[in-house]
Image (cartoon, rainbow, N blue to C red):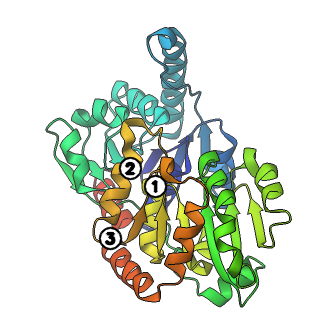
Amino acid sequence: MGQLAIACGGTGGHLFPGLAVAEAVRRRGHEVSYFISGKAVDRRALRGAGEELHGVEIPAVGWSGVWGAGNFAVHFVSAVRKAGEEMRKRKVGALLGMGGFISGAAVGAARMAKIPYFLHESNAVPGRATKLLARGAEKVFVGFADCERGLGGVKASVSGTPVRNRLGQMGKEEALKKLSLHPKRRLVAVLGGSQGARGLNEAMLRGLGALKSESQHLQILHLAGEAHVEKVRKGYEGSGFHAVVMGFCDEMEAVYGAAEVVVARAGAGTLAELAACQVPAILVPFPAAAGDHQMANARAYAKEGAAEVIAERYLEGTELGQRIARLMGDSTRCERMKHWAKEQDQPQAAEKIAEVISGIL
């Protein structure tokens, strides 16, 4: 039995694929622990998965350019030291980095301790940590084949992005009941990501006017992010819509199972989940994502028709509501989207990664 550490903190897009790999690694008889950030979303996600006791917080600060270099260096050294101490204490045999600052610090510690490490890059455009650390990795796994072009000649294995086993397993009737939603109304789910999305929230509220004629037949589940819940909830007041607004949801298998249409950002983890659950989607990539990687993700996912993509700057007035109404009124197009989403699905992603890592453990 070996011990794997997975560095996956900072966002749900890093953490949830890491949880999926952990499931597959444990099935092979190994133990797993996680390096996470101090963000509340990390602890909540681990708690929802029953994994909180296995999470180790690593001090984190993002790179903010030359002027913040000193602060970054101090925190980075502290993070590397903490990760190294934990890996020695737990007798870690291999590390998997899922991207982001936590991944970079943990890999730095693994290199110093001569512990073999693997990387997984979910996005179509590799992040800074992945590009810097790819050459020393045992193997780099990628979610999109397009990603390999940005790795400076390093060969990658196209595994897809892992999703948790329970996704795609819940029927609509059961899902609606689990979420305490109306059993007969059609559901639109708005997903702002693990930290919310102010621009998407506002576009949805502006778009309600275009859906007014369907208000008695629709219901909306809006995951607004903890910081935006009250503002979004007030936005629905008096609208005539049955809307449930939450900051975060631990039961995404029910959300995808119940939704007829999903409106979401284009984080790679979200796209992998949409593919696994075959839900028609309207994607609104986060415009400030590093390297515009969310737009690259969305285009790669939607190139055959699995989703509709629109830049946030074009969502003026009721545009988002109009797009939702058109899509929900076109059953033929929705069925095509489900078909192409299934074509994008990589259900063995976690198993492929776990199989390779188990060879080292």
Quadrant in which residue 191 is drawn: bottom right
Mark 1 and 2 residues: CB-CB less than 8 Å, in contact?
yes
Q: Position of residue 215 (x, y in %)?
A: 73, 78
The residue carrying mark 3 is 344
Mark 1 and 3 residues: CB-CB less than 8 Å, in contact?
no
> Is label 2 in a helix, a strand or a loop?
helix
The disc label shown at residue 266, or none: 1
Q: Is residue 191 above or below residue 55?
A: below
Toward the viewer: 207 or 145? 207
Give the CA separation, mark 3 to mark 2.
17 Å
Kind of residue at disc 3 = Gln
Kind of residue at disc 1 = Ala
Q: Is residue 29 visible?
A: no
Q: Residue at x 47, y 84 (%)?
A: 330
Q: Position of residue 4 (x, y in %)?
A: 44, 48
Please rate how many residues cluster around mark 1, counting C-alpha atoms within 10 Å: few if below 14, some from 14 to 19, many from 20: many
The residue carrying mark 2 is 295
